[in-house]
Amino acid sequence: MKICAISDLHGYLPNNIEESDLLLIAGDLIPLNIQSSYSLSEEWFELAFNNWVDFLPVDKVVLVGGNHDGFIDDKGFLFRDILSSKCVYLEDELYEYNGIKIYGTPWCHQFGDWWFMDKDNNLARKFEKIPENVDILLCHDAPYGACDLLLQDVRWNTHEHIGGKILRNAILEKKPSKVIVGHLHSCNHNWEQLGDSLVRNVSLKDEHYKVVYEPTYFELSTY
């Protein structure tokens, strides 16, 4: 099974997605200039996003929200209703596609007043729902210690790991085979080992919101 993974679109809808079985999107979909407007976000999903999805050469699109996706966080039921039938939105939920188990969660550790962020004790309860040994954990935040060192940006590059520690603990305990993340744009875009799991950042944009990365592709065997 061929899988494409992307994240942190911030309104960018790439036209270079290769034919794949699945497209995974790890959050931050909405354009920055309309992220605080629910009406404009709804219109963007109904027109631009759904039209893009419907013409993609993929069978299914599986996605989670991110900390810039206010409409998804606050209007989740409406968001599900307006999505293309090709899309599967996951918010602390499991989805199985041809034997591949995907669990999606949008939550990030707190560093400001953004959407889909919570305190550590609440995150621990949310991440406890992650099943053990899923094939793919799709989340917006990066875990502490993997794909969380910013490589290019002088504003945020402290040469320290800045990922989520509660998410790290959950990954070490639950042992998903692969973890697809975004959020921290300019981190290593290669697979990194965390316990028994492989973690990959799939953001398309850098910290200045310029498109500098290509979509990620990988294969998984079906059962």
Image: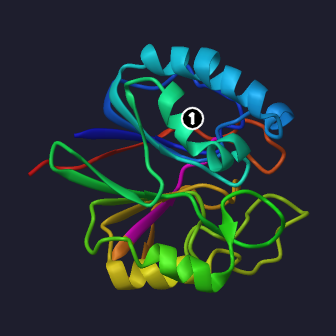
Q: Is residue 60 toward the left or the right of residue 203 in the image? A: left
Q: Position of residue 201 (x, y in %)?
A: 55, 56
Tell me if I can see residue 145 in this picture: no
Outermost residue, right direction? 155
Q: Position of residue 207 (x, y in %)?
A: 80, 51
Q: Is residue 199 toward the left or the right of residue 122 in the image? A: left
Which residue shows up at 73% across the image and 63% down it? 151
Which residue shows up at 62% across the image and 14% down it? 47
Question: Which quarter of the figure has residue 102?
Answer: bottom left
Q: Position of residue 17 (x, y in %)?
A: 46, 26
Q: Residues within 10 Å of mark 1 (few under 14, many from 20)?
A: few
Quarter occupied by the N terminus = top left
Which residue shows up at 67% across the image and 27% down it? 42
| Magenta segment boundaries in residue numbering | 198-204
Q: Is residue 32 magenta?
A: no
Residue 106 sits above or below residue 55 on the image:
below
Q: Secondary structure at mark 1?
A: helix
Pick the front one: 13 or 198: 13
Residue 17 sits above or below residue 30 on the image:
above
Residue 216 sits above or below residue 51 on the image:
below
Q: Is residue 56 toward the left or the right of residue 117 in the image? A: left
Q: Position of residue 69 (x, y in %)?
A: 69, 45
The amino acid pointed to by label 1 is Leu
Pick the front one: 132 or 157: 132
Which residue shows up at 28% across the image and 38% down it? 2
Question: Which quarter of the figure has residue 57?
Answer: top left
Residue 216 sits above or below residue 223 on the image:
above
Tell me if I can see residue 222 in this picture: yes
User: Label 1, on which residue?
Assistant: 78
Question: Which quarter of the figure has residue 171?
Answer: bottom left
Q: Report the number of discs.
A: 1
